[in-house]
Image: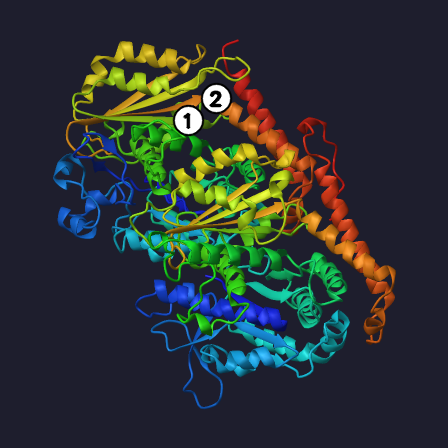
């Protein structure tokens, strides 16, 4: 069984990470009734005996759960979020040795995060990550959570990413990036995002871009359903995609609902690797199957169902509805229109009581409405995990490698170019040691060539298969 | 002379080697169960009490009916009561579950070889393995266990390899094992039981993996029993008695376990001892798989085999069973050519199997026509019978399992070739294969080999 390490960088990264640990504990508590430390738990947690006197916890590999420590590295250049975490209910899950903090923050400046703090904290970060990796028998994957618009998340986060590639080239790097919306309040977010994009394209194995606006829409949808429904259609407690552990609504912070969605995404992504099922899919299979060309590793994700109805007399939403929903825009975590664009590959990760016949039937049903690239008409990857998420009987996570992401990237590029043409705010960046104007142009070029690759693939839409000449995709 | 059953469990959960038998008391039909049941051969050596204790949650099989079954677990067990089988997987979940579900102690501990990371649906990773491990690699451990198992035999005859074409382990490590075993034991038979994926797509890499694995099997195996997921699913749905209807909400849920059951029962139907091949004292010595190969693969270049099965309760009507099997056979290729078979083997099992011999002439005629047997092979048709119906152990049930070297397989090969070529021309996913040790030559060779297979099948007919 393999292990994964979560690296949460920046304010956004840490807040999402906090929700993730909360929900993963809830999920395992739901499944693991006997309190025995099993391999599923071992994926994200160590079982330690904290009574040892020499300061180092002893790792227990089997037996009853004594004290769970998360396999996590928390990095933030401001102390606020991490301190809150350490004072909250999750404080025992983290080791103080896993935290790297500073006081002053990055000022929403990618260069400060990447170049300045990168240099300063490089050794420290490396040491912490190495220690965490040593605790793993078989480390398979790093999950990096960060935002693209800020300074620490985008700058230091991508620095950590390139560090992970250098030090652990065999370990997969999955990055969950929160992209800023068009009306983001951080002025320099286009700069930060594009500079970070270059790093993601070059160093990540797989990126799951998420847009804040989509999360807001999903939250609104759920709240609308919860508040407007009559008692007969009340939503089952704790079954929504946005519910957390705390039963009291006031205890939830403003972004918690949105962050819970991202946390659920990660839970569903790793469910097949952690729990048993009739058709398992490990994390390395996600990258192998969904990334046909090395740089085109941006996956659009969508989660269904958003909630479960409380009334058991109402027939459970038909399975087929769940599959249809996964391909509707309402359930996507980024603004994009995959149905109008070309699918390079699509993964369906199903949890719960769903059998292979249901899966095949739905694929047959949905296939005609989706356009797949000519050389990958059967580009489906499926998995069945028998453990459903908390509060649901079944759920589906769809990951699509679709050319629709280029629209988002083109928007991002436009916003970048608008600012860069006037060289607005550039001086803040150039003040930092190691940062030059060429960084900006390189990042812009990298993004442009990425968009161009997607365009090239789009051009093959509708072409008969035999007439296609060898595509020269940059590899 | 015992066969060694080699069970390879690819990461996405195929577990073969089990037969589930459930008598639907209400419907009066033979239905596969939804849960993994006992290994058929385990039933031989267990007392009925043991079995019922273990399968208390599942439908119990009435073991009193097995009085006709031979003692000792021969030929599937070693002399110390352990199965002569190895389980190999590059990640532990599936095999661990299998070990929980069968009787403890059935498998020898040293015959279980497990890796940790999985092979990521990548044939190259499966074939070459992880670069870091050397002596302790999954391949070496497996070959060690295999050698020891062979040494336990008086006379090693051959190995049966169970795997799929889609995964990384099943296709990649499977191909590697096939090659290695052939090198080490050139005189032994290698029969592979290969599961081909759903055509609509189980993994974008399935075409590459199938292409490479099939080319390896063509070179190193003696025969390949090919099962297609689409086919199996269709047969299961037909058995459950309902047609595929997209508008109705009520559909029988068919699990992978059900599908595996069907495959396992076809295998049991073919390989369980038959009267024709027992010694005079009635002992089965395990020649069935190798005789199957000798019968159904008259030419070394055409060795992809198609298996069908029908089981019925009540009075045996071999004719009607044969009719239902023949009805499901594909007759013509999409281009209009009629399919043909170079050889066919039918295995009739049941307490009244001798009636098969009585109605032989018309049955043989029907088989010849239905399967399109070629005229140049004077022994194109063969049959075995046995009074024990291992496929369904209740009394008064009969089964007919037919294995044919049918040229419809060339369509499938053609399909794989075409899809793989299209993807190869677009350079898609290739960086994963180069990264893990594959070369262009492997692909080009595979294209050539499978091309020639298609030509051979087309040429084998009566022209």
Q: Which of B193 and A330 is in front in this view?
A: A330
Q: Residue at x 40, y 59 (%)?
A: A239
Name the side, left or right, on which A43 lies relative to A233: right
Q: Say what secondary structure mark 1 lies in.
A: strand
* Residue A72, quarter of picture: bottom right
Residues at circles 1 and 2 in contact by the CB criterion of under 8 Å: yes
- Residue at 34% x, 72% y is A63
Label 2: which secondary element: loop
Q: Mark 2 points at which residue?
A: B408
Question: Is residue B45 something one can see in this rendering?
Answer: yes
Asked whether the residues under marks 1 and 2 belong to the same chain, the reply is yes
From the image, tell me which residue sits under label 1. Answer: B306
| Of residues B36 and A421, the one drawn nearer to the viewer in this rendering | A421
Q: Position of residue B355 (x, y in %)?
A: 19, 17
Chain at numbered mark 1: B
The mark nearer the N terminus, 1 or 2, is 1
Residue A26: name its quadrant.
bottom left
Q: Position of residue B216 (x, y in %)?
A: 54, 37
**Dot 2, how many residues are within 10 Å of its Cα: few (below 14), some (14-19), or many (20+)?**
many
State the residue in front, A409 or B420: A409
Task: Examine the rendered structure and indicate whether residue B80 appears above or below residue B391.
Answer: below
User: Is the image coloured rainbow, by chain, by secondary structure, or in one colour?
Assistant: rainbow
């Amino acid at each position: 069984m393999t292990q994964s390490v979560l690296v949460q960088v920046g304010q956004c990264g840490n807040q999402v990470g906090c929700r993730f640990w909360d929900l993963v504990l809830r999920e395992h508590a739901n499944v693991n009734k006997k309190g025995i430390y099993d391999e599923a738990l071992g994926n994200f947690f160590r079982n330690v005996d904290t009574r040892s006197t020499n300061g180092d916890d002893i790792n227990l590999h089997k037996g009853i759960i004594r004290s769970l420590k998360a396999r996590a590295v928390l990095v933030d250049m401001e102390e606020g979020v991490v301190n809150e975490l350490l004072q909250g209910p999750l404080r025992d899950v983290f080791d103080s040795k896993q935290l790297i903090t500073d006081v002053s923050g990055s000022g929403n400046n990618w260069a400060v995060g990447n170049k300045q703090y990168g240099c300063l904290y490089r050794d420290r970060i490396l040491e912490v990550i190495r220690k965490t990796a040593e605790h793993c028998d078989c480390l398979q994957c790093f999950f990096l959570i960060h935002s693209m618009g800020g300074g620490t998340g985008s700058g230091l986060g991508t620095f950590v990413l390139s560090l992970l590639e250098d030090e652990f080239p065999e370990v997969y790097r999955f990055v969950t990036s929160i992209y800023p919306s068009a009306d983001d309040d951080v002025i320099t977010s286009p700069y930060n995002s594009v500079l970070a994009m270059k790093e993601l394209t070059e160093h990540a194995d797989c990126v799951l871009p998420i847009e804040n606006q989509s999360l807001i829409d999903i939250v609104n949808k759920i709240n609308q359903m919860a508040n407007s429904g009559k008692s007969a259609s009340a939503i089952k407690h704790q079954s929504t995609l946005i519910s957390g552990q705390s039963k009291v609504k006031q205890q939830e912070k403003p972004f918690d609902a949105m962050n819970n969605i991202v946390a659920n995404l990660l839970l569903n992504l790793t469910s097949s690797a952690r729990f048993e099922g009739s058709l398992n899919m490990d994390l390395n299979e996600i990258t192998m199957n969904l990334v046909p060309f090395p740089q085109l590793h941006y996956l659009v994700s969508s989660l269904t169902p958003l909630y479960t109805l409380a009334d058991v007399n109402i027939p459970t939403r038909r399975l087929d509805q769940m599959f249809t929903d996964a391909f509707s825009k309402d359930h996507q975590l980024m603004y994009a229109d995959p149905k109008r664009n070309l699918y390079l590959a699509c993964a369906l990760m199903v949890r719960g009581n769903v059998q292979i016949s249901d899966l095949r039937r739905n694929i047959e049903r949905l296939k005609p409405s989706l356009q797949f690239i000519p050389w990958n008409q059967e580009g489906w990857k499926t998995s069945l995990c028998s453990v459903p998420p908390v509060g649901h009987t079944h759920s589906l996570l769809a990951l699509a490698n679709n050319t629709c992401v280029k629209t988002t990237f083109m928007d991002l590029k436009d916003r970048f170019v608008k600012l860069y043409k006037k060289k607005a705010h550039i001086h803040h960046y150039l003040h930092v040691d190691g940062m030059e104007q060429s960084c900006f142009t390189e990042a812009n070029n990298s993004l442009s060539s990425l968009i161009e690759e997607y365009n090239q693939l789009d051009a093959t839409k509708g072409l008969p298969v035999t007439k296609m000449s060898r595509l020269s995709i940059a590899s | 002379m015992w066969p060694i059953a080699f069970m390879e469990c690819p990461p996405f959960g195929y577990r073969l080697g089990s037969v589930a038998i459930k008598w639907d008391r209400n419907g009066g039909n033979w239905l596969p169960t939804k849960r993994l049941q006992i290994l058929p051969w385990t039933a031989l050596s267990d007392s009925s009490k043991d079995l019922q204790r273990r399968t208390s949650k599942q439908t119990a099989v009435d073991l009193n009916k097995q009085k006709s079954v031979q003692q000792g677990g021969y030929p599937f067990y070693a002399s110390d009561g352990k199965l002569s089988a190895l389980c190999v997987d590059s990640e532990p979940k599936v095999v661990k579950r299998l070990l929980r579900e069968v009787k403890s102690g059935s498998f020898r501990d040293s015959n279980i070889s497990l890796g940790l990371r999985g092979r990521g649906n990548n044939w190259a990773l499966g074939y070459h393995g992880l670069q870091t491990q050397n002596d302790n690699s999954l391949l070496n451990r497996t070959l060690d266990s295999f050698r020891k198992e062979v040494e336990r035999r008086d006379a090693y005859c051959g190995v049966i390899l169970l795997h799929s074409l889609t995964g990384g382990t099943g296709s990649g490590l499977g191909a590697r094992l096939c090659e290695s075993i052939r090198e080490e034991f050139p005189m032994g038979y290698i029969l592979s039981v290969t599961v081909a994926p759903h055509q609509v797509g189980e993994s974008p890499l399935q075409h590459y993996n199938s292409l490479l694995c099939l080319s390896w099997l063509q070179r190193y195996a003696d025969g390949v029993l090919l099962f297609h997921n689409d086919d199996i699913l269709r047969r299961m749905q037909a058995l459950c008695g309902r047609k595929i209807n997209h508008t109705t909400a009520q559909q029988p849920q068919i699990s992978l376990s059900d599908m595996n059951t069907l495959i396992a029962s076809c295998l049991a139907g073919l390989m369980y001892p038959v009267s024709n091949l027992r010694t005079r004292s009635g002992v089965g010595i395990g020649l069935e798989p190798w005789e199957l190969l000798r019968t159904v693969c008259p030419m070394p270049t055409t060795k992809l085999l198609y298996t069908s099965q029908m089981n019925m309760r009540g009075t045996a009507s071999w004719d009607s069973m044969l009719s239902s099997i023949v009805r499901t056979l594909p007759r013509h290729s999409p281009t209009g050519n009629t399919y043909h078979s170079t050889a066919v083997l039918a295995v009739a099992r049941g307490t009244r199997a001798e009636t098969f011999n009585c109605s032989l002439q018309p049955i043989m005629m029907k088989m010849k026509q239905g399967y399109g047997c070629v005229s140049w092979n004077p022994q194109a048709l063969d049959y075995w019978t046995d009074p024990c119906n291992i496929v369904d152990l209740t009394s008064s049930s009969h089964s007919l399992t037919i294995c044919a070297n049918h040229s419809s397989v060339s369509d499938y090969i053609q399909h794989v070739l075409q899809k793989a070529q299209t993807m190869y021309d677009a350079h898609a996913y290739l960086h994963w294969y180069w990264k893990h040790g594959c070369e262009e030559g492997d692909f080009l060779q595979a294209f050539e080999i499978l091309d020639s297979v298609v030509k051979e099948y087309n040429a084998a007919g009566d022209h």
